[in-house]
Amino acid sequence: MRLNSSYLCLICLHIICCYTTGNNYIKDNTLQAFSGRIVYPTSSTYDQDRISFNKKIDAKPAIIFFCNDSEDIKIAINYAKSVRKPIRVRSNRHSYEGFSIADDAVVIDISGITTIELNHDKTTVKVGAGNDLYNVYKKLWEEHLTIPGGSCPTVGIAGFTLGGGIGFSSRLMGLAADNVVAFELITANAQFLTINEQQYSDLFWACRGAGNGNFGVIVSLTFKTHQVNNNLSIYKIEWDWDQLYHISNSWFRIRETAPDTLMMFLRFQKQEGQKSIFSFGQYFGSMIELKKILEPLLQFPAKNILVKELNYMEAVDFWAGIPHRIHATSYREDSNKQRQAFKATSLYLRQPFSRQALEVIDKYYTQNDIKNNYTIIDSYGGQINKVAENFNAFPHRGTIASVQILAYWQNDIEKNVQLEWSRRYYCALEQFGEGGAYSNYPDIWLKDWATKYYGNNLHRLKQIKRKYDPHNLFHYEQSIPVE
Ligand SMILES: Cc1cc2nc3c(=O)[nH]c(=O)nc-3n(C[C@H](O)[C@H](O)[C@H](O)COP(=O)(O)OP(=O)(O)OC[C@H]3O[C@@H](n4cnc5c(N)ncnc54)[C@H](O)[C@@H]3O)c2cc1C
């Protein structure tokens, strides 16, 4: 039987304060009730267990608790308090800036909590916070159901949803966060709470859009489900760079009147030194209808065009690159081959890119010494924008698109060039944005990041933070401030 958590905390404190102990002593004597795996810097798996998706992150935590359930999470929280070390909450390790790990921190890893349970009438699904998106899609597909997730299969359902979560179904079904009907979480004082519209509704509001490592450790997320019985259509088109102005203008015009059933992306890229323009997307309808909507774009001579009908799961696999791309956790196993180092940032648009903005983009992509650089524009609108900016903590409801800037490098020389490019490109492009940024694409360099991420919702978020985490236990470089 497990020990009561506050009792455990006392024993833990006692032993740590009274004796000078080694890590194994702590494990053997005070963490016996912990059912998961504990990793120390001396453990043989330490280097693998501290790997992050972004290769630029190289943090060395003091201890990693791989938790199996809520009781394990409580033990880990109490342990961190007793040794007075910072806590980092981690699920699938995709934080761009490594906010789920830190030097000398206690990492509470919940990737082992992977249950997925449909309710009796299959209208909701309770998902363990350790699942990645692909697990969830795959399980729900057995019933021809889904939730609106993102394209990358390895991203964690928890980190994705807690920051908002946008993907191929969002204009039709809303953000992932908009589809949550309940969370289970462990608070700063190691209390288990079920939160929803009826109980702890303020905390429930905050966790939908600003929940990443801010208020507690999420154990499960319950979502509304959506039926996906019919085939859908996907498209992918690539053009030469010299059509930048035409393609961009045409894309924004189509976006303006596109039905909610169509999610469109536009990507300016330099890949291995070659510039090109991409648009891709997913339409819940037939290929003929999709081609009709895309007609203005299809008029421009393209390098590659792909339009095809698939069932929902085939589309998930297509965007995930399966079977060609190795699935899931492989980035954790091979630190060199699967992972890349990158810097990202974001902004939001209320207007299509003007000619002046496109001149800036053209100028920065024409820089000779950059190699792997992307500007990805996600179309907003549809269900995302049909709710008010204070519907939940995700505020960017009146925008027409998000713009994500990504720069990758292989070595230190490239790193310096890419970081400098990112900084200057963002500064030049920022004037065309509306002032916001997406917290799921965090950027440690952003000034006034809290206002950029949370807009008019920031004031309420600070109040909720003070109420549920007054001592700022869940703290990192860009966590919701208590003051
Ligand atoms: C390749 C790639 C593709 C992406 N595609 C999309 C996309 O299509 N759409 C989109 O919206 N975003 C996308 N993202 C961004 C992604 O949503 C965020 O990086 C997300 O936060 C990652 O969650 P994670 O659980 O994998 O990462 P982690 O690094 O484990 O966690 C990320 C953040 O969430 C917190 N967190 C994690 N688990 C919990 C928990 N159980 N309780 C409380 N806090 C927790 C962490 O503390 C950290 O602050 C993508 C990222 C990558 C790297």
Image (cartoon, helix red, strand yellow):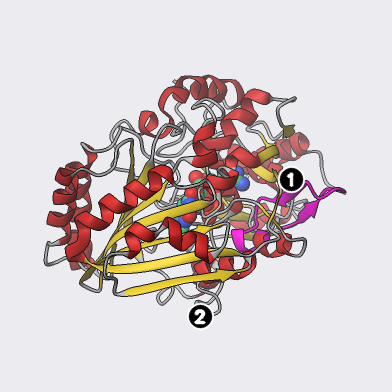
Give the image location of residue 87, x and y in percent.
Answer: 54, 43
Q: In this view, does 82 lie above or below 96?
A: above
Residue in the image at 55% along x and 39% along y: 383
**In the image, what residue type sits under mark 1?**
Ser
Q: Name the residue under label 1.
A: 70
Q: Is residue 17 visible?
A: no
Marks 2 and 1: in contact by CB < 8 Å? no
Please state which of residues 102 and 80 is positioned toward the viewer in this rendering. Answer: 102
Give the image location of residue 12, x and y in percent.
Answer: 68, 42
| Magenta-drawn segment | 114-136
**Left or right, 233 with reference to 379:** right
Secondary structure category for the residue under label 2: loop
Label number found at residue 324: 2
State yes or no: Cβ of the residue under disc 1 lies below 8 Å from any atom of ligand 1. Answer: no
Which of pointers 1 and 2 lies earlier in the amino acid sequence? Answer: 1
**Left or right, 463 with reference to 226:** left
Q: Which residue lies furthest to the bottom in this view?
A: 324
Q: Please tell me whether residue 291 belongs to the stretch shown in magenta.
A: no
Q: Is residue 393 above or below residue 467?
A: below
Q: Is residue 48 above or below residue 326?
A: above
Secondary structure category for the residue under label 1: helix
Q: Is residue 14 visible?
A: yes
Q: In this view, does 330 lie above or below 79?
A: below
Instruction: Characterize the local packing of mark 1: few (<14), some (14-19) or many (20 or more) Cα atoms within 10 angstroms.
Output: many
